[in-house]
Amino acid sequence: MLKSLAIALLVATFAQAPEPAAHQTAEGPATPAAVTSPPPAPPKSQPVTIKTRQSPQPEPLRWFLRPEWVIVWITVAYTIITGLTLIAIKRQADLMERQLENARTDSAASAKTTKAMLEAYTRQAASMEKQALLIREQIDAGIHKERARLQMELQSIDFIVALDPEEAVNIDDEDGFHLQSCIELTNTGRSNAFIKDGAVRLVLVPAGTWPLAQVSPEEFSPFSNTVEPSVEPVYCPVESDYIYLSLRQFAQDIADGSRSLYLYGFIEYESLNIRWRRNFGYVWSIGEYGDPPPPETLVVRSPPHSARLRFAGEWITSLLHDNAEYRQGPN
């Protein structure tokens, strides 16, 4: 219905349009038409003003927040940070310097203390060394007093030949012979001597022969390996290789010095858990004569009317051999 009313209103408006004021005809000018008052114009619609909300204008920034001042503040901040860093570095440097000085002081004190300790240790070590030497001397004195001591004596030389007691001695017999002697071992100490090793040789060589042949362990065979501290000796017989000479020739060579007779070797024994080595060397001597004695006087029966022939003379220490005793240390 409203729609129909609006259409009617529009039609009425257009139907009331004004007529022209004069109408000109062909015959002449038009006469003015009757004046009529124009119809009232319809009410004009008032323009609607739409109020728009305007955004408020921003307030101007303060001077210290303006962009040209930002760089200044950043520079100031970096300067402050750098200054604080330098202050911290200075403090750390001062602290390190104090620590270094303290370390030097402590090092000097420590070095002084260490030197004093070293001097004390040196004195203590010297004192302990003296004590050790004193103890060692006491031990050596006790060992020297209580250990075994082997003494050696050599018996005379016997000829091992087939001899009838009722027959005269034929010193011109060229069948040859063996020589035999004996070592007597006597312990003059306070402890037992336990024989551990040894070697010996009885040999006839031309004068001036040196060095002599090696000693033979097979020739060393004592009757006992334990020598007790007593007056009873332990015997160790020694026999030479076969000698292809007559008794006369042998005696003559010894008398004029063209041949020499040696007995030498070594004995190792233990006493108080300490091992000792006794070297020895002897040469046979018939004494000093202006002229060599006759061989008949050098080869004799001993005792008389027995089958035992002995060679005159005695064993003396050989200057060519080592005749000494050595300590070889604990066993």
Image: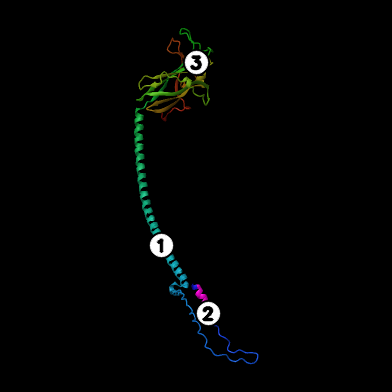
Residue 282: tell me if it is visible. no
* Mark linked to residue 12: 2
Above or below 248: residue 276: below
Answer whether residue 50 is magenta in the image.
no
Number of on-image labels? 3
Residue type of the residue flagged with mark 2? Ala
Between 4 and 134, the residue placed more toward the observer is 4
Label 1, on which residue? 88
Q: Quadrant of residue 183?
A: top left
Residue type of the residue flagged with mark 3? His
Above or below 129: residue 7: below
The answer to whether residue 104 is left or right of residue 50 is: left
Mark 3 vs 1: CB contact within 8 A:
no
Q: Quadrant of residue 84?
A: bottom left
Helix, strand or loop under label 1: helix
Which is nearer the N-term, disc 2 or disc 3? 2
Dominant secondary structure of the residues highlighted in magenta in the image: helix
The magenta-colored residue range is 3-10
Mark 1 vs 2: CB contact within 8 A:
no
Distance from label 2 to label 3 (Cα)? Answer: 190 Å
Residue 219: tell me if it is visible. yes
Between 93 and 13, the residue placed more toward the observer is 13
Label 3, on which residue? 178
Which is nearer the N-term, disc 1 or disc 2? 2
The residue located at (51%, 75%) in the rendering is: 6
Residue type of the residue flagged with mark 1? Ala
Distance from label 1 to label 2 (Cα)? Answer: 98 Å
Q: Position of residue 45 (x, y in %)?
A: 49, 79
Between 237 and 253, the residue placed more toward the observer is 237
Closer to the camera: disc 1 or disc 2? Answer: 2
